[in-house]
Amino acid sequence: MGSHNTTLLRHVLTRKGTTIPAGDLALILERIELIGKRIARELARSSIRGGLGYTGETNVQGEEVKKLDEWTNWVFLDTFESGDPVCSLISEEMEQAEHRGGQCQENSYAVLYDPLDGSSNTDINGSLGTIFSIRKRAPGHREDVNDLMRPGSEQVAAGYILYGPGTQLAYAAGAGVDIFTLDPAIGQFILWKENVRMPSRGKTYSVNQGNITKFHPGVRKLIDHLTSRKDKSTSYSLRYTGAFVADFHRCLLEGGLFMYPGEVTPDGKSKGKLRLMYELNPMSYLVEQAGGKASNGKKRLLDVVPAGLHDRQPIYIGSAEEVELAERMQVEG
Ligand code: P6P
């Protein structure tokens, strides 16, 4: 079948080698696809519908909540109202997990998500994203989320939706990364690229360079190396959108490195900004499925055991060569 006719649902149902039964994956991605369509439609017109700006609240992260952060989180809860096979929803915007139905069953899943990634871009029509991670729940669990406090390597699927000039959905479930483009005229995500392979190195790096004085000296050493312009491998350009999904998507397609380093706090401990369970784990799962790497600067990101639902980590993610270089330069001390 030509890819111009391959819808997301048909692709999921015919994808071989996934780590989650095709039927379960289809039931979950069908919901996420609907969420993506609902959010894309609202983002396109939120400026003239009073949807921009802040709610005046602060979330569990201690961040000021945008109206669209709150609304997109509601879209997840509303779209997963019936749940099955999802029994738990965990969000950047909610301190505790939300549950559906009774105790989690044998084939129950948790969806962990950042409903609107990059929300500093909402009021300036910049790129935004949704990130999701899918994990099996242990039977009998519900409020007790200890069964989820496991390394990201145990995810069964993950993906993101990028709201840019076009809306695109990328996912992986153990059989490679596939990317779909939303055709608003027919309301379908259509297959664009299948089994995407990330180039082994790129020509851009992404970091909020305004924070450079807060980083470990190794980060400054790495940036100096990448921009020393001695040869092609030291002549990188800086690209930074303020939305992890958009900067990651560039690396997935063209190679390169995204980093949000730890900040050296007065007590010398390194903290990261990005959240492990629903930002870093899903993107690290995808990057490895595409042949890239993800590290917290010291170890494989997918081996990190979370300290809680909202744990944070430093992140160095992208082409294998750049991530390995970052680790060699001891970017996290
Ligand atoms: P800063 C958005 O808030 C986000 O979580 C990521 O999408 C993005 O890469 C990063 O934070 C931007 O953070 O501190 O550079 O504004």
Image (spheres, rainbow, N blue to C red):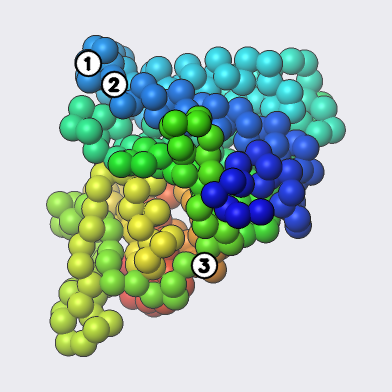
Let me know if residue 237 appears in the view.
yes
Cβ atoms at labels 2 and 1 below 8 Å apart = yes
As measured in the structure, the alpha-carbon distance from the residue carrying label 2 to the one carrying label 3 is 34 Å
**Rendered image: mark on residue 48:** 1
Closer-to-camera residue (160/322): 160
Q: Secondary structure at mark 1?
A: helix
Let me know if residue 300 appears in the view.
no
In the rendered view of the protein, which quadrant contains the C terminus?
bottom left
Identify the image quadrant of residue 298: bottom left
Q: Secondary structure at mark 2?
A: helix
- What amino acid does circle 1 point to? Ile
The residue carrying mark 3 has its beta carbon less than 8 Å from ligand 1: no
Location of residue 268 in the rendering, given as x and y in whole percent from the top left corner: 30, 54
The residue carrying mark 2 has its beta carbon less than 8 Å from ligand 1: no
The residue labelled by disc 2 is 45
The residue labelled by disc 3 is 197
Question: Which is more foreground, mark 2 or mark 3?
Answer: 2
As measured in the structure, the alpha-carbon distance from the residue carrying label 2 to the one carrying label 1 is 6 Å
